[in-house]
């Protein structure tokens, strides 16, 4: 089929509407099945809410991709392996949402999914731009992919955050396909997660009515991580670093800080920068709004880096680092306006 801006736009609108309607249906099912995320001392919410909205989001994304692949008769093995990996992760994550499963089992499935996903890369596509031998390139790529899957799950802690990050990363990659690569078809594929997240966002924006759950955040981390790896292997390594830079920085710095204190880093906690801002009295919407503003700047810098000659991409990466550093300082130290009073304990 001909891919024009109109057909791309219409397709993405349909994806967003399907996600919105699917989330509404899943919400009713989760309430009927009594699958709730109960608050505890490490939570950033105070009320039990249904978790598992990712059932709709992931189902809509995979359906859209499969439908387009069948229409375009695109049967590349790597594409189907990546989708298979996402299905594996969705299955084990949904089982974990219903009843906790051993961490070793969940991690084993993640390793299998990443191994499947790496098949999307040709031997000539080097994620580290040829600086490493192929075997080491793939080994480090696998480790980074595993880390991204888990950090995306760790960072899904307040209303709207995971959806906003998905929109930024997916939308940024779609903009590169549309404006730099000039491929409307590629732009559509890249934008599908953003459209699905946009449909989910009204249900998840503060005060949220439903959470993604692991069934949403884990496959999303896998699929977005795979898309970023593909972008890096295609030469857009700076953009692939810039787009998720807030998530990478918040999660990695928090993990490092806890590891240096000798804490068990795999345990749930409330020490991420965004969580600390909420604890000081900012609402979920205020925190996510600041992160969304920074992400908008990161998308612009990623686009500039994608257009720039190789020697100048470091300029935009440096600016992105400064922007994220400023955001982290703001989240860690900015005081809420006194007019709001003390809202450390409040309904969400």
Image (cartoon, rainbow, N blue to C red):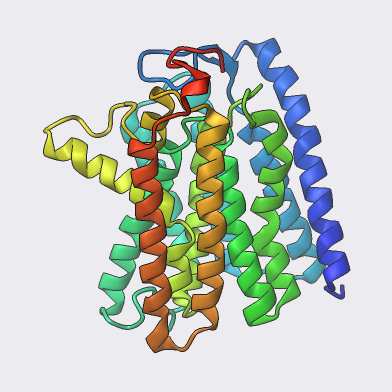
Q: Is residue 13 above or below residue 303?
A: above
Specify the quadrant of the image occupied by residue 36: top right
Q: Position of residue 5 (x, y in %)?
A: 83, 70
Instruction: Name the one closer to the observer, 63 or 317.
Output: 317
Report if residue 89 is visible in the image. no
In the rendered view, does 108 fall on the left or right side of 338?
Answer: left
Position of residue 221 relative to residue 53, above or below, is below
What residue is shown at x 33% (from left), y 31% (from top)? Answer: 103
Residue 11 seen by the camera = yes
The residue lying at 28 percent from left, 40 percent from top is: 254
Is 163 placed left or right of 134 in the picture? right
Is 278 in front, or is 265? 278
What is the quadrant of residue 128 in the picture? bottom left
Image point 44% across, 64% down: which residue?
A: 242
* Residue 79 % position (x, y): 59, 64
As drawn, is 124 to the left or to the right of 163?
A: left
Residue sitting farthest toward the front: 339
The residue at 39%/73% (across/down) is 127
Quadrant, the N terminus: bottom right
Tell me where residue 319 appears, x and y as whole percent: 40, 68
Query: x, y percentage for residue 171?
Result: 63, 59
Q: Nearer the viewer, residue 257 or 195?
A: 257
In this rendering, the answer to whether 66 lies above or below 187 is above
Q: Quadrant of residue 52?
A: top right
Quadrant placement of the C terminus: top right
Count all numbered tags in the image, as a single digit. Answer: 0
User: Would you say 347 lies left or right of 242 here?
Assistant: right
């Amino acid at each position: 089929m001909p891919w024009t801006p109109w057909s791309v736009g219409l397709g993405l609108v349909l994806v967003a509407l399907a996600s919105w309607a699917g989330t509404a249906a899943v919400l009713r099912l989760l309430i009927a099945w009594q699958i709730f995320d109960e608050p505890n001392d490490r939570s950033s919410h105070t009320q039990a809410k249904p978790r598992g909205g990712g059932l709709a989001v992931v189902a809509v994304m995979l359906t859209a991709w499969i439908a387009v692949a069948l229409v375009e008769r695109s049967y590349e093995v790597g594409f189907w392996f990546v989708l298979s990996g996402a299905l594996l992760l969705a299955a084990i994550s949904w089982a974990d949402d219903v009843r906790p499963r051993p961490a070793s089992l969940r991690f084993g499935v993640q390793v299998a999914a990443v191994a499947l996903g790496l098949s999307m890369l040709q031997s000539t596509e080097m994620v580290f731009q040829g600086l490493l031998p192929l075997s080491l390139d793939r080994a480090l790529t696998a480790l980074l992919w595993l880390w991204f899957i888990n950090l995306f799950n760790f960072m899904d802690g307040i209303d709207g955050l995971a959806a906003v990050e998905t929109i930024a990363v997916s939308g940024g990659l779609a903009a590169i396909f549309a404006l730099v690569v000039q491929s409307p078809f590629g732009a559509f594929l890249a934008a599908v997660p953003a459209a699905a997240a946009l449909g989910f966002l009204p249900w998840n924006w503060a005060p949220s009515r439903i959470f993604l759950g692991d069934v949403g955040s884990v496959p999303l981390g896998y699929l977005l991580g795979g898309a970023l790896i593909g972008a890096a292997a295609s030469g857009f390594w700076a953009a692939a670093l810039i787009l998720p830079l807030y998530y990478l920085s918040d999660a990695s710095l928090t993990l490092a800080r806890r590891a240096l204190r000798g804490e068990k880093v795999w345990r749930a906690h409330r020490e991420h920068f965004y969580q600390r801002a909420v604890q000081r009295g900012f609402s979920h919407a205020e925190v996510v709004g600041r992160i969304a503003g920074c992400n908008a700047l990161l998308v612009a810098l990623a686009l500039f880096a994608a257009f720039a000659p190789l020697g100048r991409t470091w300029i935009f990466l440096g600016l992105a680092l400064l922007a994220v550093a400023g955001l982290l300082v703001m989240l860690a130290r900015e005081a809420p306006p006194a007019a709001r009073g003390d809202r450390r304990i409040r309904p969400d």
